[in-house]
Amino acid sequence: MADLPLRPGSTLGIVGGGQLGRMLSQAAARLGFDVLILDPEDDCPAARVSAGQFVAPYDDPEALTALGRACGVVTFEFENVPAVSMERLAEAGARVAPGPTALRVSQDRVEEKSFLNAVGAPTVDYHPVATLDDLHAGVERLGTPALLKTRRDGYDGKGQVWVRDPAEAAAAFAAISGRPAILEAAAPFIRELSVICARDWDGRMAVYPVGENSHEGGVLRVTTAPAIADEKTLVRSRAIAEAILDGLDYVGVMGVELFDLGDGVLLVNEIAPRVHNTGHWTQDGCVCDQFEQHIRAIAGWPLGPTQAHARVEMTNLLGDEIERWTDLNGENDARLHLYGKAQARPGRKMGHVNRVLGPI
């Protein structure tokens, strides 16, 4: 196992080759690291800015062993990595960050809710659902409207459906194909916030300013940060983030999505054990963005500063909105970030633009 801190010139591995892996690889290169990508898609976005790629499924034992042997530390750009893959990487000699506890918790929404409440990070009330009878019981206990989500997988609004009346329960369960699920009570929130935070191997932590988020159809459209918030809300959001990081013995950057109920009352919606879409504003609002911060944390380097030097509005570019690149690239105080994806499909994240609104 590699000694920390990793020296410049060392090799890092990233499981997953999408836009998050791409921006992580670019940050690692700035710090002098070589990066190897594991992804089943040949010439994926991350591979085109990296030193090399293993083209293989995420659970391919030979590819995982080769990646683990070649890299001092291996990380990932998404949370649904098979547990066996993490074990294989560790057996091959690599440090793996974040670790298996964070993955296990974040891969199951019921386990995630249970963990969060146990560490003092409150959530909405919820009810586990394995059968239609469970769903009926949950609707009776929580009332409607309530949100039915698959326990595993699903993101950007996928794998979930609202139950707005008890009579809709059977149709909602059929809509998720009867998979194990969680029913969540509706949250009376006034806005959605998020906090990007980091923890290193020695337990030191760094927390970025809170961002305010706007979604359309379950997909993030805009994050504005730092959000305008009172001191009570800021203190509480930081305390929640730090409790989660410590509770998971976490290493790396994490995104924590929050419901703001007002007067400093916050509920955790969900956590993402990775760099996060709502943290893209840091690329143009902070000296050390979330991608560099993640690389610093897993490589055993000192965590970077998290203060914002500018207020930024981050807007996702979905599908054929990418064709606006010529106009966006000519805007004053706007910085365009494109992901190098070959095909623009409806709703697919193709890039984002950070508009610098002014100094702090």
Image: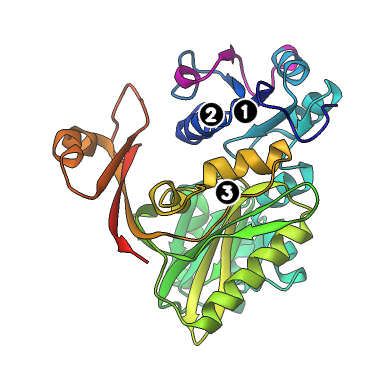
Q: CA distance from mark 3 to mark 1?
A: 30 Å
Residue lying at 78% horizontally and 48% vertically, measured from the top left: 101
Q: Would residue 343 appear left or right of 61 to someone viewing this image?
A: left
Amino acid type of the residue tagged 2 in the rendering: Ser
* Residue 316, x across and y down, in percent: 32, 46
Amino acid type of the residue tagged 3 in the rendering: Gly
Q: Would residue 266 appear left or right of 247 to someone viewing this image?
A: left
Nearest to the observer: residue 89 or residue 307: 307
* Residue 224, x across and y down, in percent: 36, 61
Q: CA distance from mark 2 to mark 1?
A: 11 Å
Q: Is residue 348 above or below residue 263?
A: above
Q: Of tags 3 and 1, which is closer to the observer?
A: 1
Q: CA distance from mark 2 to mark 3?
A: 38 Å
Label drawn at residue 25: 2
Residue lying at 18% horizontally and 33% vertically, measured from the top left: 323
Label drawn at residue 178: 3
Q: Secondary structure at mark 2?
A: helix
Give the mark nearest the N terminus, 3 or 1.
1
Q: Residues within 10 Å of mark 2 (few under 14, many from 20)?
A: many
Give the mark nearest the N terminus, 2 or 3.
2
Taking the magenta stretch, the answer to whether it contains residue 164 is no
Magenta segment range? 47-62
Q: How many marks?
A: 3
Q: Would residue 231 appear left or right of 352 to someone viewing this image?
A: right
Amino acid type of the residue tagged 1 in the rendering: Val
Instruction: Give the quadrant of residue 38.
Output: top right
Give the mark nearest the N terminus, 2 or 1.
1
If the image is split into quadrants, where does the C terminus sit?
A: bottom left
Q: Label 1, on which residue? A: 15
If the image is split into quadrants, where does the N terminus sit?
A: top right
